Amino acid sequence: ELGRFAHYMRKEIHEQPDTVRDACRGRLRPAEATAQFGGLNLPPSRLRRIRRIVFAACGTSWHAALVGEYLIERLANLPVEVEYASEFRYRNAPLDDRTLVFVLSQSGETADTLGALREARRRGFPTLAICNVVGSTIAREADGGIYLHAGPEVGVASTKAFSAQVTVLTLLALHLGRLRQLSFPAGLDVLRAIESVPELLSRVLDREPEVIAAAERMAEARSALFLGRDLHYPVALEGALKLKEISYLHAEGYPTAEMKHGPIALIDPETPSVFVAPRGSLHAKTLGNIEEVRARRGPIVAVGTEGDDELARLADHVLTIPDAPEVIQPLLAVVPLQLLAYHVARLRGCDIDKPRNLAKSVTVE
Ligand code: M6R
């Protein structure tokens, strides 16, 4: 079943062009420049009345939800809050009937996420699920939702489920945007961008040798910083989680510009910084932040856009992704970070598919 791969994690990373294709299947409506879901069980009139969205999730699913927040704000101009399910379930989070609650879970069995779903439903709020495992407890108990169609994810480190979640959330942002202020041409641009992702992801995967070179440099480190801003902040968090989870190397994710408010004190020649820095609206500012790390002789790995010579001049290693519209960049930029964690863990001799102290789904509080 593993075929040419030594581990499920790497197999699942390489499946991601298909994962994104499968998450989009049957959901794109180019004639109306929108996306559509069969299982939301909410009429457009009800969805248009929504004034706020709350996402509750854990771990990687929480990071995907954070990408969703940025996308929904951009495309649909709706306020979104992303909650740790473990916090949400015991708080008295203000909800009203114009708030839509979603839980996100790959497995559909995470105890804290199930607790959040039950608490929201107990209070009488219809709650939707974004879930991978069909027929799982969360999928059964939710009032409706969206399946990821990512197929079984075996590696404890979640990879393809993240990509499927972000794909579905991009489609949801498009759908909500088109019910509000997003014009037909702007919607069509988003739709075309999503359609291009599988092909672009294949090109990202072809650059794995660049990642291996960077992993060789990072494998000896004791700690690493992951930095990204805007849509790439959640990607940085996810890169840090992947690395600590399977390589046991300490890593922290931060919004890039927060670095100067404390974490910059950690920078030294032994502490690599991994910047998620594709070309985009805030790129010049990110380059400035990278200069600050370089001035302190910190090793720099950067996920960057093909042909970005300025970035190549500043970074010790560039993990290249193709030029692409900003809304799909998280889907491309996360892949080199998944591979980076994989190769660092491999070089450190770690048990990649079964990292210590972790289970595939966390069914206890
Ligand atoms: O199955 P879920 O998406 O509910 O799982 C949530 C987290 O336990 C999970 O994402 C965990 O953080 C992964 N091991 C991350 O790779």
Image: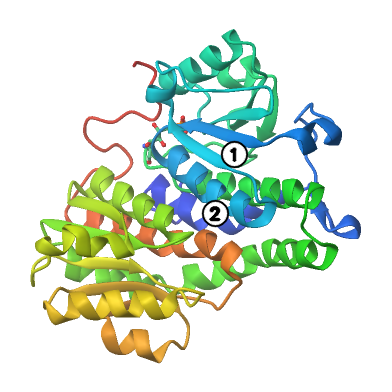
Q: Position of residue 215 (x, y in %)?
A: 25, 66
164 over 228 or under it: above or below: above
Q: Residue 151: which numbered mark, if any?
A: 1
Mark 1 sits near ligand 1, with its Cβ under 8 Å away: no
Crowding at mark 2 (Cα within 10 Å: few <14, some 14-19, many 20+): some
Where, by quadrant of the figure, is residue 137 drawn?
Answer: top right
Side of 23 where 297 appears, left or right: left
**In the image, what residue type sits under mark 2?**
Glu
What residue do we see at 48% from left, 73% from top? 206
**In the image, what residue type sits under mark 1?**
Gly
Where, by quadrant of the figure, is residue 100 drawn?
Answer: top right
222 over 313 or under it: above or below: above
Q: Secondary structure at mark 1?
A: loop
Residues tagged 2 and 1 counted as in contact (Cβ below 8 A)? yes
Mark yes or no: residue 1 visible. Answer: no
Q: Position of residue 74 (x, y in %)?
A: 62, 57
Q: Earlier in the sequence, mark 2 or mark 1?
A: 2
